[in-house]
């Protein structure tokens, strides 16, 4: 794998800018061929991709396929199907006073992109935005996380056998290499990760007025009202909190539960975990691990042992933490001071829904919000809160629909992607007005002859 040097990235950027200026990437045939080659390479290396995800995060083949591999393959196929439609210029209505001019929107590739991916879904979160780069006709330098090294290795193989580095290139490294990248000028930076590093990315981008897409996170709340279908809600919450051992940016971070169903819900969630993974959960081959020792120690430190209702066990040798429910939590507890990003589920009870909304408002706007209960009450909750996305009587499923934009709001992110939004993310929408020369109306010219007549059509 290639690790960055300052001069190396300068040379790579120079080559990519030169290649992009050649206009080759703009041809629909070029874009379609690039997408097809990426798809073929992914399918060829499917077994190795799933193996790498198991080595990095102990993901089962089934979980890795469902939450990473299949999503990338589906995204590529969608772009191949829709590329001609999405990239075609669109006719836009022209006001009467501007006629006989005609108006259109043209889509042009934004240029040279930097894509920085995290370790938690290393394949999906690097290759999914890459699909948008390819369909838009742009170029990119990809930077996977150093913490998911096995997945980074197989992605390195795929990129190098599929693309000319002047078009798409992959580089590796950690903090030092990131600092080198942040000092360079790109046309767009796409970053997925935590808020702290997101601020560093945005600050670095400001030096060159580089536009950014920031996919961050935060404390995504999950409200369970007294009207919820309890057993279904518990099963869906249990699933969404333990996929990838809770290391998911849109996992329910904490529960806000109506006091009348609190104890029953906690018991049902614990029961659902045992049914999914067996008892004890830590013996399951389907249960993922925490990415590294530092994150493991951090999560252990967030658990107040006196407030553990279920779970709490861990295995430092395998870096696994049992799904854990913390009861009688307040917003002052340590576990509520930061995004958890692990299989720990704090529970806070409420008397009425306004109390729950008030608690949500104590935190920054979350990446996701989940509500289980009556659909009419759900509409009220959505109206009174702000979040990047939301699910009613489910969790995380909005990310699986490529026809929905995925992104945050406020501290949880800036910009969106997936499906058509990915194409737009790496494109510039250029407004174009075409005016004929067979007529040249005098209204706009000094001394504005006939202006009174024109004014009637403008107001």
Image (spheres, grey):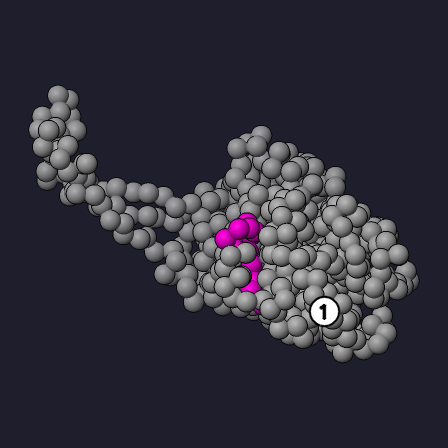
Labels in figure, total:
1
- Say if the magenta span includes residue 280: no
Residue beneath disc 1: 265
- Element type at mark 1: helix
- Say if the magenta span includes residue 393: yes
One can see residue 446 in this view = yes
Please state the horizontal and vertical placement of residue 257, each as a whole percent of the image. Answer: 68, 61
* Location of residue 22 with respect to 292 vertically, above or below: above
| Residue 314, quarter of the rendered image | bottom right
| Foreground residue among 344 and 7 | 344
* Location of residue 405 with respect to 201 vertically, above or below: below
Please state the horizontal and vertical placement of residue 397, each as a whole percent of the image. Answer: 58, 66
| Residue 369, quarter of the rendered image | bottom right
Please state if 243 lies on the left or on the right of 35 as rendered: right
Quadrant where the C terminus lies?
A: top left
* Location of residue 3 with respect to 403 vertically, above or below: above
- Start and end of the magenta stretch? 382-394
Please state if 52 lies on the left or on the right of 20 as rendered: right
Q: Residue at x 63, y 60 (%)?
A: 223
Q: Residue at x 69, y 70 (%)?
A: 234
| Foreground residue among 277 and 102 | 277
Q: Residue at x 26, y 41 (%)?
A: 433
Please state if 59 lies on the left or on the right of 79 as rendered: right
Please state the horizontal and vertical placement of residue 416, each as a whole percent of the image. Answer: 52, 51
| Foreground residue among 334 and 164 | 334
| Foreground residue among 440 and 35 | 440
| Residue 457, quarter of the rendered image | top left
């Amino acid at each position: 794998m290639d690790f960055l040097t300052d001069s190396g990235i300068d040379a790579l950027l120079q080559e990519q800018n030169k290649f992009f200026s050649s206009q080759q990437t703009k041809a629909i045939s070029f874009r379609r061929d690039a997408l097809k080659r990426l798809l073929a390479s992914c399918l060829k290396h499917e077994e190795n991709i799933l193996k790498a995800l198991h080595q990095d995060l102990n993901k089962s083949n089934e979980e890795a396929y469902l939450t990473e591999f299949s999503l990338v393959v589906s995204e590529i196929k969608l772009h191949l199907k829709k590329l001609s439609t999405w990239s075609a210029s669109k006719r836009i209505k022209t006001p009467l006073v501007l006629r006989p001019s005609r108006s259109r929107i043209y889509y042009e590739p934004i240029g040279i992109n930097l894509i920085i991916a995290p370790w938690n879904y290393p394949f999906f979160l690097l290759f999914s935005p890459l699909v948008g780069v390819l369909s838009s006709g742009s170029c990119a330098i990809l930077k996977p996380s150093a913490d998911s090294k096995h997945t980074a290795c197989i992605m390195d193989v795929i990129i190098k056998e599929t693309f000319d580095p002047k078009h798409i290139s992959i580089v590796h490294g950690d903090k030092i290499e990131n600092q080198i990248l942040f000092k360079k000028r790109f046309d767009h930076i796409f970053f997925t990760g935590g808020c702290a590093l997101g601020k560093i990315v945005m600050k670095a981008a400001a030096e060159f007025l580089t536009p950014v897409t920031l996919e961050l996170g935060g404390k995504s709340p999950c409200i369970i009202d007294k009207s919820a279908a309890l057993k279904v809600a518990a099963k869906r919450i249990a699933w969404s909190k333990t996929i990838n051992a809770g290391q998911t940016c849109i996992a329910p971070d904490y529960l806000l539960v109506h006091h009348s169903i609190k104890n029953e819900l906690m018991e049902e969630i614990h029961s659902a975990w045992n049914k999914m993974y067996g008892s004890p959960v830590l013996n399951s081959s389907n249960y993922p691990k925490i990415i590294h020792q530092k994150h493991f120690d951090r999560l252990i430190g967030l658990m107040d042992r006196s407030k553990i209702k279920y779970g709490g066990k861990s295995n430092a040798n395998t870096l696994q933490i049992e799904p854990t429910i913390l009861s009688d939590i307040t917003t002052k507890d340590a576990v509520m001071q930061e995004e958890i990003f692990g299989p720990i589920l704090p529970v806070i009870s409420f008397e009425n829904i306004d109390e729950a909304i008030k608690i949500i408002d104590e935190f920054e706007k979350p990446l996701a919000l989940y509500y289980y209960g009556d659909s009419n009450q759900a509409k009220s909750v959505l109206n009174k809160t702000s979040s990047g996305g939301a699910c009613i009587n489910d969790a995380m499923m909005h990310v699986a629909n490529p026809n929905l934009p995925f992104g945050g709001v406020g501290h949880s992110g800036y910009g969106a992607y997936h499906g058509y939004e990915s194409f737009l993310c790496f494109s510039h929408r250029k407004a174009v007005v075409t005016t004929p020369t067979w007529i040249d109306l005098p209204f706009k010219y000094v001394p504005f002859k006939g202006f009174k007549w024109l004014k009637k059509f403008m107001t």
